[in-house]
Image: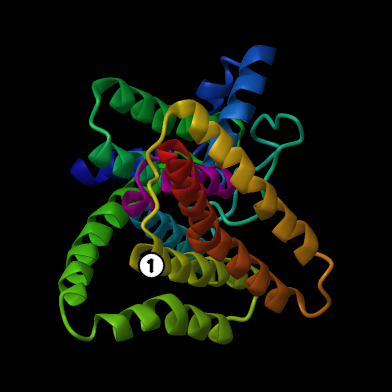
Amino acid sequence: MIYCCSMSLVNYLEGYALIHWVQSFHSPFLDYFFYGITQFGYKYFYILAIVYLYWCIDKRFAVRIFYLFIVGVLANQYIKYFLSTPRPDPNEVRVIFDYYRVDPSFPSGHAQGSFAFWGFLMTRFRNVYFIICALSMIFFVSVSRLYLGAHYPIDILGGFILGALTIVLFLFFFKIYERIKMTPHSKIFDICLFVLVPLGLFVAVPTAKMGMFMGIITGFGVGAYLEKRYIGFTEKTPFVYQVIRTMVGLVPGVLIFFVGRMIPGPLNIRTLVVYAVAGFWVGFIYPYCINAFQKWHERKNVR
């Protein structure tokens, strides 16, 4: 009896019934709404959010959530391509704005990313209004994947489970890292973590996608390490200045990617270098500029 019920549940989660039910509420407004909501599950949103946290809110927490995000993405990609489960058949589901993905389906990167990102943020920002907002983002981003016909329900469930495991394992290993930081060999460990391991993984898997991840790990990791050691800029500032600071800092970042496209050479090497430079700009160079401006402003006010 229990076996039959469990198999029925699995078949339901792997089938189209829930997708069809969610899509039965379709309307032009919901089409645009869920297509817009699903954009909050892509890496560019998370990168911008982490950059904003680092420059304007809490740089130490931003470094932690950055590594949580990277580890989660890499785990998701490995599991996806290892299992290689197909996406829902476009002949069986409603495709909106010609939106259809051909990469593997399980687990949902959107569900996993939103659960891990917003769930981890809730450990830092415990205001009831923020928690409601975070839970809403997790819910709507996940539902958008069903509404757009991009995932099966079991993909969403798998994403939630993997997102929760990512948070738990990250917190466990972060405690170990904090203990290592108290030892005399912490510098050697940091060099391995920020430089040798990412570059070694890139050599082992020299693809453009791996170059992107390993480049940003190296650039931002080294930059944040040097910022903490030599700069110590003040990230907290009024909201208006937060917006200005972020917009000013993003302009050179965009230019780095624009110029990087014109650099000759293999795509994987170029991607590694461009993302490393962009990460170093975010982690060290721009904080150095912020700190220099803060000191100049303080001297000006003293006069």
Q: In which quarter of the image is residue 224?
A: bottom left
Measuring from the top left, give residue 226's x and y in whole percent.
Answer: 41, 69
Q: Mark 1 points at which residue?
A: 230
Measuring from the top left, give residue 172's x and y in whole percent.
Answer: 19, 62
Residue at position x 38%, y 56% from top? Answer: 63
Q: Which colour scheme appears in the figure? A: rainbow
Q: How many callouts does the rendering have?
A: 1
Residue 55 located left or right of residue 37 = left
The N terminus sits in image quarter: top left
Q: What element carries label 1?
A: helix
Residue 20 falls inside the magenta stretch: no
Vertical arrangement, residue 68 with respect to residue 180, above or below:
above
Nearer to me, 185 or 47 = 185
Nearer to me, 179 or 281 = 281
Residue at position x 40%, y 52% from top? Answer: 233
Q: Main SS of the magenta segment?
A: helix
Kindly tell me whether residue 108 is visible in this rendering: no
